[in-house]
Amino acid sequence: MHRALAALIIATVINGGITLIASPGYAQTSPELTKKVLQMERDREKEFEDYFKEDLATVSKTADQTAAELSRLSAITGTGSALLYVIPRKTHLHLVLITPDGTPIVKDFYEVTDPLLFETAQRFHTSILRLNQAVTQETGQQLYDWIIKPYEQELKDARINLLLFCLGDGIKDLALPALSNNNKYLIESYAMARIPAFNLIETTYKPFESGTLLAMGASTFQDSTIPPLPGATKELNLLNQSLNAQRPNNWTVKRLENNNFTQGKINQQIASTPYSTLHISTHSQFRPGKADASYIQLWDQKLKLNALNTIAWRQSGADLIVLSSCQSALGDKDAANGFAGLALKAGIPSAIGTLWSINDKTTATLMKNFYQALPSSSTKAQALQSAQVAALRATNANIAERTPYYWAGFSLISTPW
């Protein structure tokens, strides 16, 4: 009700007459601030156009239009969605929050220089991979204090529970779910997604409908020098068993494995059958350098990122593509752009990827929980949140398997709805 009322014009009776008062949440953004937010969007767009070497979109949504879109989508999905830009600017950290109820809230922190921010982010990432919980908590709290704490009251007042992060160079690969405050992880408070730019994501909402999932991957490869990936078969087996066994049966799983996991056979399959989700379990790397340095390993070839659209993913009709065992080079601008641009290049509204290679067993379990949560969740972001929270609170896992290494690397990319 709060969000719906905030979108209305408030009628107040004064001296027997009616005066129309614009909701304070929709005060018009100043021309100067509008120009700055648009430029920030254009800068983000240009980063991805330069990386992929192609035109992507015309940035046209103003800050007020973005707030209106967030309000509309929040009302449709029953969520409170906000957009947070986190942009390192060498001498300071530049933050901009846009909520459904208000104009952009800009905050600059000159004590947070790029070297300090990047060094802290590096320590945070390394500590997660090394299962060093003490350093993860310390650095995760510091990053929370810089990025989230400045907006705690505004997020509470606007009843936000879904955050879209638009991250600048140097922190695009930040493991956002593991930021923490007083030993509580950020994912426990907010569903989330990372976006390349608001103007580059799909904002037409349709409820997710479970249907047919195309599960693809390879445990062995035509080139015998490529290390085998036995976890891929285990993951696809678990998805097949758990999703097909659901009652009522919401999912049908079809598989393309090993020597059937080729460009030609994928195109043939998605041309003949509509799919709601495409799931890929194989070696994949987002590497430094141009887009052709990054790839998804098919059975017989490396599908390079700049050639991702040689597979007609969009023809499948899928709303989501999942790359469950990918890895991004930490701190590298190009690798981070490739990861964040995955859905954009595939031409599908949403993608899920992993920032690092994750344990086979826990990946399969988390993915199973995600797919089981999807049909009853208002948004994809909330389904992933529930799967991640289940992982960190699992009572049947040992203590190590509840640490961020096993769940915080999963990221929803582009549209969270």
Image: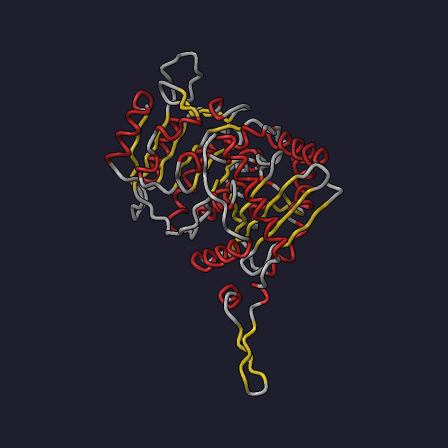
User: Residue visible at 59% across and 50% down?
Assistant: 35
Q: Nearer the viewer, residue 190 or 297?
A: 297
Q: Examine the rendered structure and indicate whether residue 376 appears above or below residue 405.
A: below
Decide if residue 415 is in sight here: yes
Residue sitting at the far left: 272
Q: Nearer the viewer, residue 61 or 347?
A: 61
Q: Which residue sits at x=43%, y=24%?
A: 304
Task: Pinpoint residue 121: horizontal percent, then vertical percent.
Answer: 65, 34
The answer to whether residue 394 is seen in the rendering is: no
What's the image's color scheme?
A: secondary structure
Where residue 254 appears, as percent x and y from the top left, is: 29, 34
In which image quadrant can residue 56 be found? top left
Relative horizontal placement of residue 145, taking residue 161 as reference (left or right): right
* Res. 137 image quadrant: top right
Count numbered badges in the picture. 0
Q: Position of residue 206 (x, y in %)?
A: 37, 51
Residue that protrudes farthest toward the top in the picture: 225
The location of residue 196, given as percent across then percent down, is: 52, 40
Q: Viewer-proximal residue, 337 or 81?
A: 337
Q: Is residue 151 above or below residue 408?
A: below
Residue at far bottom of view: 16
